């Protein structure tokens, strides 16, 4: 008989393997109180424990913690502990803390999704056992469509829109009209607000919806006098997602379309030409696999005799790969001359004033450090005492047109500090305010960098101030969006050659960021295009909103072209399309030197591979359509008879598109997207080097060979 030996302390986790499964998954290192409690005390090395409240109301009016729902509640609780454990080894929690935290969060989001859709899933009748393979894989496919769990798990835009429309319907028309008459700014809806607010609500209902939110107590600090007013999104979230356990901790997007404050209610000089900027940020492969793993772990509930989906349904989960079903809409093309003139203006502005603009900003930051004050404590007199002569001659007179700095005539919250639209933009172009001028310069760098690299908007807003350029100052490093496949969640990087002028502009912003660090305005590296608020208050801002603000300042400062009374406010997806359009245009005209200068590649075939690998199919289709439409519109139909015949066969007539280049481009883009038309370069090796030409192919059906 072998002597009995105790398992060494460092291997004590092996004792758990002997534990009967019926006793397992009731404890976890992060669960501080008893499994049976209705409010769990949870601590993943937080500063203070957090509470997880299982007392949520269900669609039938009962509460999850009532005795009739005990089996469902028990399944949920076991599922959370299973998800955070090494569930192949009973309830051992030997996996890393970060893995446990992520699995805990995912498990709760899955539970929330089930609770929000409990009636549709028949959850109170069949429990988790009633979940079919279609339910589970459909759930995963939905989750995969967005990197934001607010969108994918909680369907926040749709639920919020439904809530808003119901609230508006239930609110008195007379009360709404009276409020709108008293506060006219509530009726102002701008293109930028629409652009940044993908909410499925009728735009003509927005003023009434804003009024309804105020009248029903969903506005904070109303009316806007001493403090800025805003819609109380957390309060709305508590109402809409009351049947969830995790949702209150999930960050919800802010939609400018719901702005109710009367401060800065116009953001551009003109209404914008409509654009679509949504490129569809999908869930990364690594996060998707984590969701799939957690959902599959429900199968362990069978060992406990608890309700769980069938093995067949769980096998479908294990094998499931999400469909790439999120497709962006059609993008409007900015005219080539608008983009080219913008690049030209940006470069010329940089050479004339870029260094002095950054110099003045750095002087102001150092003055703030020496006097231990923030930027809004700087007086206009201070600005002028530090201002380079070139900027004085340009017209700089104060810190900012709308800055709330010492000596400013405006109060803490002033509704009218911008004044009339006409006067504000007159002052902008007269260079009165330095902060606006700085925003224009950052916009210049964004225009040149965006046009010469063709990167996604998110890749540009993520671009760090430190380490973006390599040691030679000739290559720019980007962290790719949508690129984590096979990378364990790490994003791939790509080095992109840049022209010296772009590197020089980026270098100016690097110097500004170095001063930010040295003067203590920030204690961490910020994204390259971070900028101070035009009010001079608060911290240095970054992200999409600030990036678009700088582009808008640039477009109004340089007065980009108008079309039907609306201005082209350039967006990165338009610059990406221009990148490809320039290739086609120069290839057609034999102007290869322009391609090499503008796009920074020496080898034309390498450039084409770069375009194909880094520009989305939707944008490429638009670039090809623009090229073909431009050729037909400016040079005639010779050489494009097959294409024009196909347009005639598909749409019934040619005549109505001949005089309308935009309509012709739209029709060709549809044919390119349908696989019936294509335009590709042909590289021809000649003694003097590689030449290229654009070859157009037309098919009568998608199965026809070229």
Image (spheres, rainbow, N blue to C red):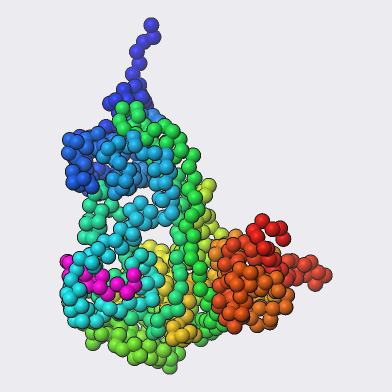
- Seen at 22% across and 57% down, the residue is 239
Give residue 516's position: percent from left, percent from top.
38, 70
Q: Quadrant of residue 370?
A: bottom left
- Seen at 25% across and 75% down, the residue is 261
**Residue 344 versus residue 70 in the image, above or below:** below
The N terminus sits in image quarter? top left
- Seen at 29% across and 61% down, the residue is 162
The C terminus sits in image quarter? bottom right
Q: Work out whether residue 433 or residue 198 is closer to the camera in this orientation and state it.
A: 198
- Seen at 33% across and 67% down, the residue is 201
Question: For the magenta stretch, what is the residue range?
Answer: 202-220
Left or right of residue 33: residue 609 = right
Q: Quadrant of residue 69?
A: top left
Question: Residue 213: within the magenta?
Answer: yes
Q: Main secondary structure of the magenta part?
A: helix
Give residue 159's position: percent from left, percent from top.
30, 58
Give residue 669's position: percent from left, percent from top.
58, 69
Give residue 107's position: percent from left, percent from top.
33, 43
């Amino acid at each position: 008989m072998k002597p009995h030996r105790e398992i060494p302390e460092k291997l004590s986790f092996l004792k758990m393997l002997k534990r009967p499964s019926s006793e397992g998954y009731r404890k976890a290192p992060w669960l501080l109180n008893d499994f049976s409690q209705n409010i769990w005390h949870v601590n993943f090395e937080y500063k203070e424990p957090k509470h997880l409240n299982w007392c949520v109301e269900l669609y039938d009016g009962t509460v999850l913690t009532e005795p009739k729902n005990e089996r469902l509640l028990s399944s949920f609780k076991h599922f959370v502990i299973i998800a955070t454990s090494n569930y192949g080894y009973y309830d051992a929690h030997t996996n890393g803390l970060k893995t446990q935290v992520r699995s805990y969060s995912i498990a709760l989001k899955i539970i929330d999704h089930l609770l929000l859709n409990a009636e549709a899933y028949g959850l109170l009748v069949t429990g988790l056992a009633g979940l079919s393979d279609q339910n589970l894989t459909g759930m995963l496919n939905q989750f995969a469509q967005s990197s934001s769990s607010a969108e994918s798990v909680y369907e926040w835009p749709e639920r919020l829109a439904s809530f808003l429309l119901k609230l508006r319907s239930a609110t008195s028309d007379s009360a709404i009209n009276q409020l709108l008459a008293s506060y006219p700014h509530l009726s102002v809806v701008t293109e930028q607000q629409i652009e940044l607010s993908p909410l499925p609500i009728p735009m003509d209902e927005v003023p009434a919806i804003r009024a309804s939110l105020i009248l029903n107590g969903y506005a904070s600090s109303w009316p806007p006098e001493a403090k800025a007013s805003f819609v109380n999104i957390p309060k709305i979230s508590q109402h809409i997602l009351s049947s969830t356990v995790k949702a209150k901790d999930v960050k919800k997007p802010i939609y400018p379309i719901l702005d109710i404050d009367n401060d800065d209610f116009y953001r551009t000089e003109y209404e914008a030409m409509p654009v679509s900027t949504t490129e569809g940020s999908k869930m990364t492969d690594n996060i998707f696999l984590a969701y799939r793993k957690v959902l599959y772990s429900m199968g362990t509930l069978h060992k406990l005799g608890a309700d769980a989906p069938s093995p067949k349904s769980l096998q479908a989960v294990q094998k499931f790969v999400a469909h790439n079903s999120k497709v962006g809409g059609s993008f409007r093309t900015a005219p080539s001359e608008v983009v080219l003139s913008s690049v030209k203006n940006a470069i010329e502005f940089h050479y004339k004033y870029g260094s002095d603009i950054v110099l003045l900003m750095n002087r102001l930051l150092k003055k703030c450090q020496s006097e231990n004050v923030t930027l809004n404590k700087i007086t206009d007199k201070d600005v002028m005492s530090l201002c380079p002569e070139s900027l004085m001659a340009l017209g700089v007179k104060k810190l900012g047109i709308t800055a709330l700095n010492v000596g400013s005539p405006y109060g803490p919250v002033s509704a009218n500090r911008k004044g009339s639209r006409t006067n504000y933009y007159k002052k902008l172009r007269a260079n009165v305010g330095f902060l606006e001028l700085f925003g224009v310069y950052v916009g210049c760098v964004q225009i040149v960098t965006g046009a010469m690299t063709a990167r996604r908007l998110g890749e540009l807003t993520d671009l760090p101030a430190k380490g973006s350029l390599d040691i030679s100052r000739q290559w720019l490093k980007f962290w790719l969006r949508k690129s984590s496949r096979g990378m364990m969640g790490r994003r791939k990087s790509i080095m992109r050659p840049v022209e010296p002028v772009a590197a020089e502009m980026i270098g100016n912003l690097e110097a500004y960021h170095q001063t930010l660090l040295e003067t203590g305005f920030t204690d961490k590296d910020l994204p390259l295009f971070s900028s101070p608020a035009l009010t001079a208050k608060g911290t240095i801002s970054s992200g999409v909103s600030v990036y678009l603000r700088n582009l808008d300042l640039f477009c109004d400062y340089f007065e980009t072209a108008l079309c039907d009374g609306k201005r082209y406010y350039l967006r990165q997806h338009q610059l990406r399309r221009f990148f490809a359009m320039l290739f086609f245009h120069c290839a057609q005209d034999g102007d290869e030197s322009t391609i090499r200068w503008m796009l920074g590649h020496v080898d034309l075939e390498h450039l084409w591979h770069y375009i194909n690998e880094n520009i989305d199919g939707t944008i490429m289709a638009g670039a090809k359509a623009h090229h073909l439409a431009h050729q037909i519109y400016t040079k005639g139909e010779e050489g494009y008879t097959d294409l024009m015949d196909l347009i005639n066969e598909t749409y019934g007539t040619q005549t109505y598109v001949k005089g309308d280049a935009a309509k012709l481009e739209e029709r060709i883009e549809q044919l390119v997207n349908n696989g019936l038309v294509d335009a590709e370069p042909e590289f021809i090796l000649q003694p003097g080097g590689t030449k290229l030409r654009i070859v157009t192919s037309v098919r009568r059906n998608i199965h026809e060979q070229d």
